[in-house]
Amino acid sequence: MRVELVRRSERSAAMAYLSPLLALLLTLIGGALIVIVWRLSTVDLSNPETGGFFGALQQGFVDYGRFLYVFFIEPLTELWSLEELVAKATPIILVAIGLSLCYLSNTWNIGAEGQIAVGAITGSFLPIFFPDWHGPFMLPAMLALGILGGMAYAAIPALLKIRFGTNEILTSLMLVYVAQLFLDWLARGPWRNPEGHNFPDSRPFDGGQLLPTLFGTNIRISLIFVFVAAFAAWFLMRWTKMGFQIKVLGQAPRAGAFAGFSQNRMVLLTFLISGALAGLAGICEVAGPIGQLRTSVSPGYGFTAIIVAFLGRLNPIGAIFAGFLLALSYLGGEGAQIALGMSDQTTRVFQGMLLFFVLACDSFIFYRLQIVRTPAVQAGTVSS
């Protein structure tokens, strides 16, 4: 007897809606197991004063209750937490919108983290080399350079795939480390602030070199970019011929080829769009919450955006809700370190489980489990 995945004759509409909820539920169950095992590992089970195994198990459930509160509820109780939530969600959602278009066209850009770094580098060129320029065109020029930098860096794996047939997953991923090392070298070397007492940072940006805030809060205008990008992507997919081509080439490449749609053109186009949004996210970080170029401008937003894209069902509007959920996990992870003394890798484990369960549950939209019984070998049968 064996278990096989059998393709469904029709797509499961119910599973399409239940998949994200089921993935989140399984992630919460997995998180409970991690917290309980962590608690058991920190307690001397042979000591009767600690209550032994069952006492540690009970404390593990209590800790998990605190973990869920710190992770999901506490960051929403204070204004400064909400501002921080928006600051973390903004770059994640921007990147996820671009990645959604890539994945819908069956093109796999895994290197958004590197495109964020390059967007931050190119967008920081003007305030670093012209620190006294604060005119009205300074910020638009910085944003434009950031977008162009992200597009240029994303074009590399796209052109390699078109010209040489290379795997865009590998090339885009490897280019992440090239960009991060280049950023580290710039911040520690030629672009380091000469008045910064040898800290690996650039000159601080100020005045017209920073994104303005909204409504008297610390929320930057980059939040508006998120909604504009989401609406533009939704309109592209819903009402334009290009959006139709993206869907056809992603779902039925042969049908798209018969219709005259160019797969190579779509690879380049979707990479450029996703790279532009990743570059925009990078420059918005250094011209916003960070305020200068540092050795690292992203704690993994480019990789988190992959989870957001799939959790949002590759829908630009869904990416907004999923982005805030994953941003909440960043804040919650920081709170769990302080309140429970857990490792800073807890957030990454939580996000990794969520991505795994999202992809696993999504497979049941198109496939179902089937038990295949192997016929028993008759007694006395002699092999030839």
Image (tube, rainbow, N blue to C red):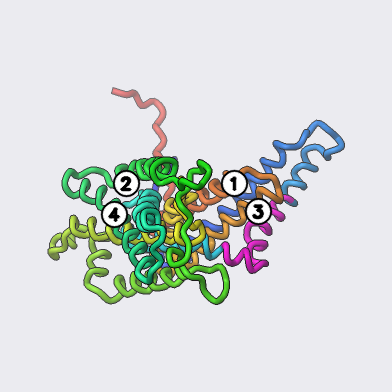
Which comes sooner in the sequence, label 2 or label 4?
4
Residue segment shown in magenta = 63-84
The amino acid type, in three-letter code, at marker 3 is Gly
Please say if 48 is above or below 176: above
**Residue picked out by circle 1:** 346
Q: Earlier in the sequence, mark 1 or mark 4?
A: 4
The Cα–Cα distance between marks 3 and 4, rounded to whole angstroms, is: 36 Å
Near-viewer residue (282 or 156): 282
> Is label 3 in a helix, a strand or a loop?
helix
Check disc 1: other Cα within 10 Å, few if <14, some if 14-19, many if 20+: many
Q: Find disc 2 in the rendering and name its residue.
A: 172
Query: Residue at left 16%, top 47%?
Result: 163
Task: Find the distance from the CA under tag 1 to the CA under tag 3.
Answer: 11 Å
Q: Which residue is mark 4?
A: 107
Q: Regarding mark 2 in the picture, which secondary structure is present there?
A: helix
Dominant secondary structure, magenta? helix
